Image (cartoon, helix red, strand yellow):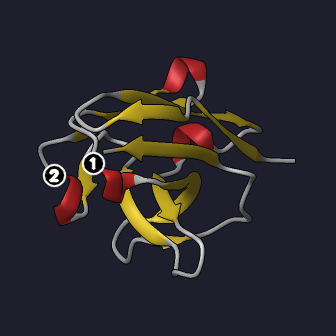
């Protein structure tokens, strides 16, 4: 069974940094694009960033210049480095395989990892 497991969330003050990890088990990681999404209670899940098989990256406007997505295919892991965090970045962050052209998630969701940014 293919699974993606998120980790690395936590509490940080505004302006701080966190690095999230998305670790894959199963055989398709090296041939799949991966995206990070976030959701706050009462709101729709929002796409945040994505990386293709070849390493091309894409970001939602609100995180450009602050977040960096990367992947290590040898470790079956995608990372999201988040700098200059703002209270508005507070959410549960989840990763998923995704269709890069449409930013559409393709699989089921895991538990995600909570990021809390205090002002």
Q: Is residue 94 in sight in this rendering?
A: yes
Q: Is residue 79 visible?
A: no
Question: Looking at this rendering, what residue extends furthest in the right direction?
Answer: 1
The image position of residue 5, as x and y in percent, is: 70, 39
The span from disc 2 to disc 1 (Cα, nearest Å) is 13 Å
Q: Nearer the viewer, residue 45 or 16?
A: 16
Query: Residue at coordinates 26% horizontally, 48% vertically from top-left?
Result: 57
x 52%, y 81%: residue: 44
**Quadrant of the rendered image containing residue 62:** bottom left
Q: Position of residue 86 (x, y in %)?
A: 27, 48
What residue is rendered at 74% in x and 52% in y? Answer: 111
Residue placed under numbered mark 2 in the picture: 64
Residue 109 percent across, percent down from the top left? 71, 61
Location of the C terminus (image quadrant): top left
Towards the viewer: 58 or 16: 16
- Dot 2 crowding, Cα within 10 Å, few <14, some 14–19, many 20+: few
Q: Which mark sits nearer the N-terminus, 2 or 1?
A: 2
**Are the residues flagged by discs 2 and 1 in contact, CB closer than 8 Å?**
no
- The residue identified by callout 1 is 86
């Amino acid at each position: 069974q293919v699974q993606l497991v998120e980790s690395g969330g936590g509490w940080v003050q505004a302006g701080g940094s966190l690095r999230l990890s998305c670790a894959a088990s199963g055989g398709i990681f090296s041939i799949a694009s991966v995206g990070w999404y976030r959701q706050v209670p009462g709101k729709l899940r929002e796409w945040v960033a994505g990386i293709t098989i070849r390493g091309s990256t894409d970001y939602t406007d609100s995180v450009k210049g602050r977040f960096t997505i990367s992947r290590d295919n040898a470790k079956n892991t995608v990372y999201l480095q988040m700098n200059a965090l703002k209270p508005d970045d507070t959410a549960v962050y989840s990763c998923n395989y995704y269709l890069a052209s449409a930013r559409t998630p393709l699989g089921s969701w895991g538990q995600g990892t909570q990021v809390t940014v205090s002002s």
